Amino acid sequence: MDSREFLSRCFLFDIEINEKNEIYSLGGVHGDQHFLIEPGRKIGREQLAAFDDLATGADFILGHNILAHDIPRLTEFAPELAFLGKPAIDTLYLSPLAYPENPYHRLVKNYQIVRDSVNNPVEDAKLAGRVFTEQWEAFSRQLTAGSDAPLLYRGFFNLDPSLQGLSTALSSMGVPLLEGDDLYETFSWFIQEKVCEKALQHLVDQLIDGRSVYPPLAYVTAWLTVAGGNSVLPLSPTCPRTAPRLMDWPFFTRTEPDFIWQY
């Protein structure tokens, strides 16, 4: 499967919200069909039903920052939308993993899509598809280079029911699934030369005892692939599932074993 075929199975969407936290425009794309409610037009049950219908044949929903932004707001506004129950793929979550040395895609600035047009949700949805296509290519390069990092990304995402869409997307890219001891042992092997033994044992103990929140470890893995360079982990309030938990993780570097880095 290639990225184009995978995207054909996705409903791409975006919403616009004003300063009153009201949805004033929304749009979606599935295949060669699209739906748009422009600013100023009424967003009623009939319009929402047409929006929902466009997603009927999709297996996934995809967009940029949809997990923290679009999905929660649409759930409050129109909980009856059936497509909200489909597995979600958020390109904001994938960018730091696809490009750990520079965790912002060239079409992303300050966690937002760099638009080709002004306030057009359909074009923004299509742009998220372009971002995903290039992320797919980046993960393919990582796999070709023999990196185990994508396997860890998928393994940690797979342990969070809300991130099954991300796990499935990585699976479609050819990333094998690591589970249980295989996941823990691969993670231990992957980081053993990058942290001191005390930190390694602490991390592994938390994993084995089930005291760890798993998705943040995907971002830890990504950062460790480029540790020592100029990369930083992008901690943003738009990623509440990852950013706060990352701040809780201590890391002891090989070069400074008595110093605790907080990321």
Image (cartoon, grey):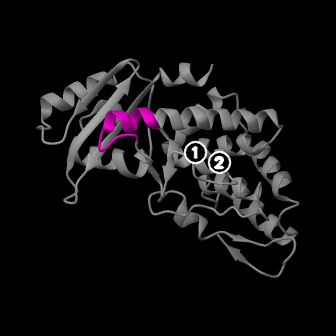
Question: Within the image, what quadrant is residue 220 found in?
Answer: bottom right
Report helix, strand or loop for mark 2: helix
In the image, 192: left or right of 27? right
Q: Nearer the viewer, residue 105 or 182?
A: 105
Q: Amino acid at mark 2?
A: Leu
Q: Nearer the viewer, residue 173 or 124?
A: 124
In the image, is residue 110 above or below residue 166?
below
Residue drawn 48% across the image and 55% down it:
111
Residue at mark 1: 94
- Mark 1 in CB contact with mark 2 (< 8 angstroms): yes
Q: Quadrant location of the C terminus?
A: bottom right
Report helix, strand or loop for mark 1: helix
Q: Which mark is residue 97?
A: 2
Residue drawn 79% across the image and 42% down it:
148
On the image, the x and y values in percent for residue 173 come to 66, 29
Mark yes or no: residue 235 visible. Answer: yes
In the image, is residue 15 above or below residue 228?
above
Q: Amino acid at mark 1?
A: Leu
Q: Is 168 inside the magenta-drawn segment?
A: no
Specify start and end residues of the magenta stretch as a single range.
116-127
In the image, is residue 68 above or below residue 26?
below
User: Residue most toward the bottom?
Assistant: 258
On the image, the x and y values in percent for residue 259 come to 78, 81
Q: Nearer the viewer, residue 96 or 9?
A: 96
In the image, 56: left or right of 147? left
